Amino acid sequence: MHIEAHNVSLSYQEGTPFEFKAVSGVDLAFAPGERIGIAGPVGSGKSTLLALLAGIMAPTSGDVAHDGRKLGRKPLPGPGSLGFAFQSPENCLFEKTVHDDVAFAPRALGLKAEEVNRLTKEALACVGLDVERFGSRSPFSLSLGEQRRVALAGLLAMRPRVLLLDEPTAHLDPLCRHDIIERLVRLNDETGVTVVMVGHDMDEMAHFSKRLVIMDGGRVAADDDSGRLLSDRNLLERYSLRLPGTVELCHLLGEATGGIVAPVLDEPAAVELLFQMAGGAEGASCS
């Protein structure tokens, strides 16, 4: 699915003394199969932009289009074509069992029971949950990380062409965060589903995104290859974002050796570089 935003703006409390422009004049286009991160300081318009792209909110001005079709004032994409996860999606869980919660959307699409069960099992496996172990449990008996996985599985069970995720790893422990990001990367690589993720953690963005959009003051401040943007210390500092740990490591190694160490985003490559330099390798660099 192609998603396009043409000069999109959205104001809250429009026409009142408290009017606030959350998104202003945004032009973006996302192609099928992309893996895109959206970052920026608090209040920069990231979550509002994601809701506009999903068609959950209608812009005050401008247009959002899915596959060339402009969304109306009460827009919603076709059933199953797009999955959207709000911040804290576990708050949307409501069924008595994990299986029924994940199966809700396929059932609502009118699929046969056999197909519903197959999609439910596959979606749970995709997020690292075994249907035999978790299917009959109450979603409210699970840990926060497990609940987050169930909510994500509920989206995957629709077999969407696009996933729009608003900080899917927020408030989770590091191991759980890493696992979810790794699964999203694998999902994109193996199925070609477009994944757009809002986030604050630049280490996660380095691992997840191929393209990065930085928002500031409701506008697109930067839109480029992730490696290029995440290696630009001055750019990130300008928008109150920190360098990924691997890039910071390369800067520190360069300062320590008096040389130039090309920044890396890949953690294994950064570890290999560190061992090379610790072993006395001269002119070590990695890209």
Image (tube, rainbow, N blue to C red):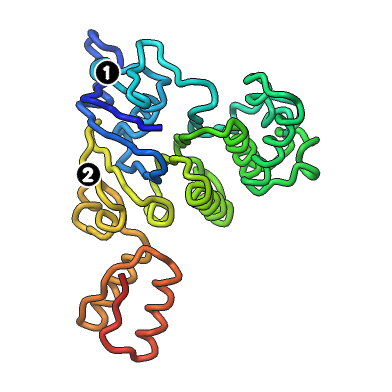
Q: Determine the secondary structure under disc 1.
A: strand
Q: Residue at x 39, y 79 (%)?
A: 274
Q: For the residue marked with disc 2, what is the amino acid?
A: Ala
Disc nearest the viewer among 1 and 2: 2
Towards the viewer: 159 or 163: 159
Q: Along the line of sight, which residue is nearer the eye, 274 or 13?
A: 274
Residue at figure coordinates x 74%, y 33% from the top left:
117
Do residues under tags 1 and 2 come within 8 Å of each other at their CB atoms?
no
**Quadrant (top left/top right/bottom left/bottom right) for the N terminus:** top left
Q: Residues within 10 Å of mark 1 (few under 14, many from 20)?
A: some
N-terminal of the two: label 1 or label 2? 1
Most foreground residue, 223 or 120: 120
> Disc number at residue 222?
2
Binning the other alpha carbons within 10 Å of mark 2 as few (below 14), some (14 to 19) or many (20 upward) gives some
Residue at coordinates 21% horizontally, 76% vertically from top-left? 260
Residue 88: image location, x then y, percent: 53, 34
Where, by quadrant of the figure, is residue 267 drawn?
bottom left
On the image, the x and y values in percent for residue 73 come to: 35, 11
Element carrying mark 2 = strand
Q: Which mark is residue 11?
A: 1
Farthest bottom residue in view: 280
